[in-house]
Image (cartoon, rainbow, N blue to C red):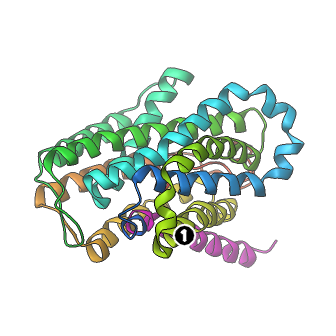
């Protein structure tokens, strides 16, 4: 492969990851177009159906590594439960606190939770960088709690208690994302390809969400708009977004990809203001900026760190699951 071909491939990879981040950033705004559908139904449709679609396209590697996957069923079970919890908490957070705040808290808290999980499960020590990121993130969460309630031109005012509760639920979303990311990394570390690891975790998680969808999903059938929102959430951000991300990750490497996905927060916040009509106070914007800064510190690769090639075994051929930073 020539240098020009490699550069072109990297450029297309960057574009694919940016497009995936844009799609993920639309989830909260898309959900706002189905106000009659509960957050549990939205989450179950998005991650449940989307997870099953991911398992379907990963059927071949899952079958090829079925013995290894069967031997790792406790890890898959933990990851699948986290996959099921994540969308329920994520969309509930956005309904309670607003799209902008819910997205920032859910995504911004994931790297902090990931470091705690790695400290407990893998005995990895906390770093000065993590301490700085954690301090910024906690300050940002405090600012959001102290800020006044959010206002929306397209819906009722968000009360102060709902904002605080939404922030708490967002922290649960960040923790659950960190847990299923850890589980997928653990499977990959055991020699299971990332496609099989992600397909199995998301597939089982999707199955767990089907009963939730069956119980709460009736409002999807009440109008074509609600049904279109559900179909969009499952097929576009949760399925096409992951396919684009996996394709791009094979061409740019995990570190660059993780940095590019920071654009999801920007997209979500801009759409929340321009489309949903949310209005945040200066204190709330300060808190959001602090959490975004924390996320940037925790996810952007250190310049001293050795740059891995796409064929580095540690990146599983470039198709490693990203560090916790996003996923709507």
Question: Residue at the spot x=65%, y=44% of the render?
Answer: 207
Where does residue 185 sit, x and y in percent of width and height? 64, 38
The residue located at (51%, 28%) in the rendering is: 118
In reply to whether residue 15 is colored magenta, the answer given is yes
**Magenta stretch: includes residue 144:** no
In this view, the residue in front, 236 or 321, is: 236
Residue 160 at x, y = what percent? 14, 48
Relative to 313, 64 lies left or right: right
Please, is residue 83 above or below residue 222 in the view?
above
Is 142 displayed left or right of 231 in the figure? left
The image shows a total of numbered marks equal to: 1
Q: Range of the magenta residues?
A: 1-29
| Element at label 1 | helix
Q: Give the residue pinned by disc 1.
A: 232
Compared to 123, does 268 lie above or below? below
Location of the N terminus (image quadrant): bottom right
What secondary structure prevails in the magenta region? helix
Residue 21 appears anywhere in the view: no
């Amino acid at each position: 492969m020539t240098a020009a071909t490699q550069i072109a491939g990297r450029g297309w990879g960057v574009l694919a990851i940016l497009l995936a981040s844009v799609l993920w950033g639309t989830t909260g705004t898309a959900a706002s177009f189905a106000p009659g559908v509960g957050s549990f139904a939205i989450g179950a449709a998005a991650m449940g159906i989307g997870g099953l679609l991911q398992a379907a396209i990963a059927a071949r590697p899952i079958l090829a590594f079925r013995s290894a996957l069967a031997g790792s069923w406790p890890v898959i079970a933990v990851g699948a439960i986290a996959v099921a919890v994540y969308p329920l908490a994520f969309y509930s957070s956005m309904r309670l606190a607003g799209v902008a705040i819910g997205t920032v808290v859910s995504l911004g808290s994931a790297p902090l939770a990931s470091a705690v999980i790695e400290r407990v499960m893998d005995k990895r020590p906390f770093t000065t960088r993590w301490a700085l990121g954690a301090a910024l993130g906690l300050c940002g969460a405090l600012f959001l709690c102290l800020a006044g309630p959010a206002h929306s031109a397209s819906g009722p005012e968000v009360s102060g208690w709902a904002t605080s509760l939404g922030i708490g639920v967002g922290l649960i979303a960040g923790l659950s994302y960190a847990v299923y990311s850890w589980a997928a990394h653990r499977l990959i570390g055991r020699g299971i390809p990332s496609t099989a690891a992600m397909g199995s975790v998301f597939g089982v998680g999707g199955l767990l969400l089907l009963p939730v969808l069956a119980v709460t999903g009736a409002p999807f059938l009440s109008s074509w708009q609600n049904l279109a929102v559900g179909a969009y959430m499952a097929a576009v951000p949760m399925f096409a977004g992951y396919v684009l991300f996996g394709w791009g990750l094979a061409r740019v490497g995990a570190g660059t990809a993780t940095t590019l996905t920071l654009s999801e927060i920007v997209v979500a916040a801009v759409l929340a203001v321009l489309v949903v009509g949310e209005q945040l106070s200066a204190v709330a914007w300060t808190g959001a900026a602090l959490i975004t800064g924390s996320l940037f510190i925790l996810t952007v690769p250190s310049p001293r760190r050795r740059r891995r090639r796409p064929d580095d075994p540690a990146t599983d051929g470039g198709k490693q699951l990203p560090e916790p930073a996003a996923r709507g």
